């Protein structure tokens, strides 16, 4: 049926057409080519999120780094080059189309201060978004700190023929991104007849799919622990002159920041692994010492090119080939399962190749995963690590990631011995521990139903692991003794425990939390953890990452809104049928369905 519809639409127009597909009214973009697909993505994102996009493009156009890139035409020079440095034909067409579609919607719906954008602007936005080092730097590059960045993370489980009930691949994707604002998702089905048919999500301002599936392969991205940049320590002869190989070099005054051969100088860096500003490390800038950010993704469009290949992938091998060809992504793992029953974990991403004798602060590297290298020797400037030295594993059993390092992809086969810049190989977070304990229990029985239950059973890993040994002697402790140790809507005790555990789990912390919460400690979680839509409260299950709740929900308690957490949750099972069995929950768009655990059939075969 859908082929007939597409054929008739293409007879009418070569431009993409959006139509409803499924009970969530998922837009269906149908186009004859990638440029038309990009047009539909740009138009659809604008239709659903115009005010967020208008703010995004306005704020990026105003920031110092963006203005500097524009003035020097840095990104234009990259775009003018052939791949793998410049964009592939697919990436170029997606960007051209996106700008056309976005501008067409803006012209018809002038509001929120939206204005037309150019291709150069969209390339600059994607370039800056995937330059992790510059993104993390404060003071020096930015005249004042950027606004708070919400936490990002994810869970993904891929199970192959050796672990599924049907002998083919099954995937759970559970990305954790902000529910609102400039880093949120847009969900759509994207079709180029005979080439592309994908159900998935794009990040606002980006025309590529990091989380989705087609008839052959399903994939999801998780934020990794790897660093794509180094800090370079400069020895100064005065505040703006540094030494390289014994010769003085003058910093370049860009008007917005001071630049060096190693990158811009900064005085503060975010070292929290989840991209937030929760952990800030000050860096000195004196007459004798300064630090520059050397971002290994700053001279090419690595991530955009690699992700553009995902649309036409048919197998996990295809995904791996796209990553290998362009050098991977930036701080993103890709986990996938296909209809053949193969799985993939690929920690293939832009990572610096650092010489051991060039590291000047081993303790900083051990603590943060970021290398500080000696800027007095030009030979110490890091290059990009070759992809054949990066962690990845393909198998017919399973692979998982929940934002711990590559070492915790498999309980039975840890990947170890990789450079520290990839992440800590010894410490796993609580969500990772939960996954590695649960997955082996279900091997041989995995299907879409098992995945759906596992991701939303709301077990509180921290409580299961620590509550019985935590000091609790007050009468209010009875609330926790009766608690089911889950973060369900009706769970009484979850709110008390989560806030107590996050505050340190001490007797003093317990007293403070009880005093702050008052009668709320006796209320079901859903009476306090909810969002408001159309004037009505929608109770939400799930819990914070600090408690290791797999179904992560982080609340902004002042705004009574989810700051980030389970967003596009999807479970895909390949069978002997041509189309996979798939279920999705687009939580930010339909918190009522999410709160009720009411899964929707995937849009691909609707």
Image (cartoon, grey):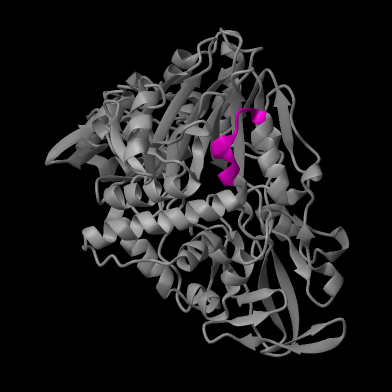
Query: Residue drawn 51% across and 30% down?
Result: 194
Q: Of residues 501 and 285, which is closer to you in this image?
A: 285
In which image quadrant can residue 262 be found? bottom right
187 on left or right of 573:
left
Give how far across and how far down residue 483 sits, in percent: 34, 22
Query: Residue drawn 33% across and 19% down?
Result: 482
Query: Residue drawn 65% across and 61% down?
Result: 300
Magenta-drawn stretch, dominant element (helix, strand or loop): helix
Is residue 131 placed above or below 568 in the rendered structure? Answer: below
Magenta span has 314?
Answer: yes
Give how far across and how far down residue 274 sits, in percent: 53, 50
Q: Is residue 398 in view from this perspective?
A: yes
Placement of the C terminus among the 4 image quadrants: top left
Magenta span has 424?
Answer: no
Is residue 552 placed above or below 141 in the rendered structure? Answer: above
281 on left or right of 415:
left
Q: Of residues 97 and 50, which is closer to you in this image?
A: 97
Is residue 462 placed above or below 422 in the rendered structure? Answer: above
Q: Is residue 28 in view from this perspective?
A: no
Placement of the N terminus among the 4 image quadrants: top left
Give how far across and how far down residue 344 sits, in percent: 66, 29
Residue furthest out toward the front: 11
Query: Residue drawn 33% across and 41% down?
Result: 17
Give how far across and how far down residue 385 sits, in percent: 78, 53
Residue furthest out toward the bottom: 238
In which image quadrant can residue 495 be found? top left
Magenta-tinted stretch: 307-316
Total of numbered circles in the picture? 0
């Amino acid at each position: 049926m859908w082929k007939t519809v597409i054929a008739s639409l293409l007879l009418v127009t070569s431009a993409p057409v959006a139509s409803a597909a499924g009970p969530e009214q998922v837009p269906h973009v149908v186009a004859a080519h990638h440029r038309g697909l990009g047009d539909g993505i740009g138009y659809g994102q604008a239709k659903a999120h115009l005010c967020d996009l208008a703010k995004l493009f306005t704020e990026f156009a105003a920031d110092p780094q963006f203005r500097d890139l524009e003035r020097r035409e840095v990104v234009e020079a990259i775009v003018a080059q052939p791949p793998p440095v410049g964009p592939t034909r697919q990436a170029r067409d997606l960007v051209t189309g996106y700008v056309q579609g976005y501008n067409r919607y803006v012209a018809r719906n002038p509001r929120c201060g939206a204005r037309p954008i150019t291709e150069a602007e969209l390339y600059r936005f994607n370039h800056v978004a995937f330059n992790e080092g510059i993104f993390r730097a404060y003071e020096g590059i930015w005249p004042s700190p950027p606004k708070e960045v919400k936490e990002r993370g994810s869970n993904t489980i891929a199970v192959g023929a050796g672990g599924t009930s049907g002998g083919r691949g099954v995937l759970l994707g559970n990305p954790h991104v902000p529910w609102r604002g400039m880093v949120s998702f847009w969900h759509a089905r994207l079709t180029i007849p005979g080439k592309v048919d994908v159900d998935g999500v794009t990040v606002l301002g980006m025309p590529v799919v990091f989380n989705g599936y087609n008839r052959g392969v399903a994939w999801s991205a998780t934020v990794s622990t790897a660093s794509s940049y180094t800090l370079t320590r400069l020895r100064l002869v005065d505040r703006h002159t540094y030494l390289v190989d014994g010769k003085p070099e003058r910093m370049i005054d860009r008007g917005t920041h001071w630049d060096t051969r190693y990158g811009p100088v900064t005085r503060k860096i975010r070292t929290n692994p989840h991209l937030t500003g929760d952990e800030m490390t000050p860096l000195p800038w004196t007459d004798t010492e300064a630090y520059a950010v050397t971002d290994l993704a700053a001279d090419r469009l690595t991530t955009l090119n690699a992700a553009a290949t995902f649309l036409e992938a048919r197998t996990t091998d295809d995904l791996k080939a796209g990553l290998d060809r362009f050098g991977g992504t930036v701080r993103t793992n890709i986990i996938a399962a296909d209809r053949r029953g193969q799985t993939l974990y690929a920690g293939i991403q832009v990572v610096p190749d650092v010489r051991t004798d060039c590291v000047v602060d081993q303790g900083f590297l051990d603590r943060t995963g970021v290398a500080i290298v000696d800027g007095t020797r030009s030979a110490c400037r890091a290059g990009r690590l070759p992809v054949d030295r990066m962690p990845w594993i393909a198998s017919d059993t399973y692979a998982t990631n929940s934002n711990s390092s590559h070492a915790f992809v498999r309980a039975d086969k840890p990947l170890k011995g990789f450079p520290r810049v990839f992440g800590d190989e010894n410490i796993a977070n609580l969500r990772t521990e939960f996954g590695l304990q649960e997955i082996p229990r279900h091997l041989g029985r995995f299907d879409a139903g098992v995945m759906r239950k596992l991701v939303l059973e709301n077990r509180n890993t921290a409580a299961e692991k620590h509550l019985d040994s935590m000091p609790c002697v007050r009468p209010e402790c009875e609330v926790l003794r009766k608690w089911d140790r889950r973060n369900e809507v009706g769970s009484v005790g979850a709110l008390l425990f989560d806030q107590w555990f996050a505050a340190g789990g001490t007797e003093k912390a317990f007293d403070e939390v009880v005093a702050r919460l008052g009668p709320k400690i006796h209320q079901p979680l859903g009476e306090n953890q909810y969002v408001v839509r159309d004037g009505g409260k929608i109770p939400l299950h799930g819990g914070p990452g600090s408690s290791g709740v797999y179904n992560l929900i982080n609340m902004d308690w002042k705004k009574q809104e989810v700051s980030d957490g389970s967003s596009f949750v999807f479970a895909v099972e390949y069978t002997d049928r041509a189309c996979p069995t798939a279920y999705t929950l687009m939580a930010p768009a339909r918190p009522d369905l999410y709160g009720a655990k009411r899964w929707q059939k995937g849009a691909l075969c609707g």
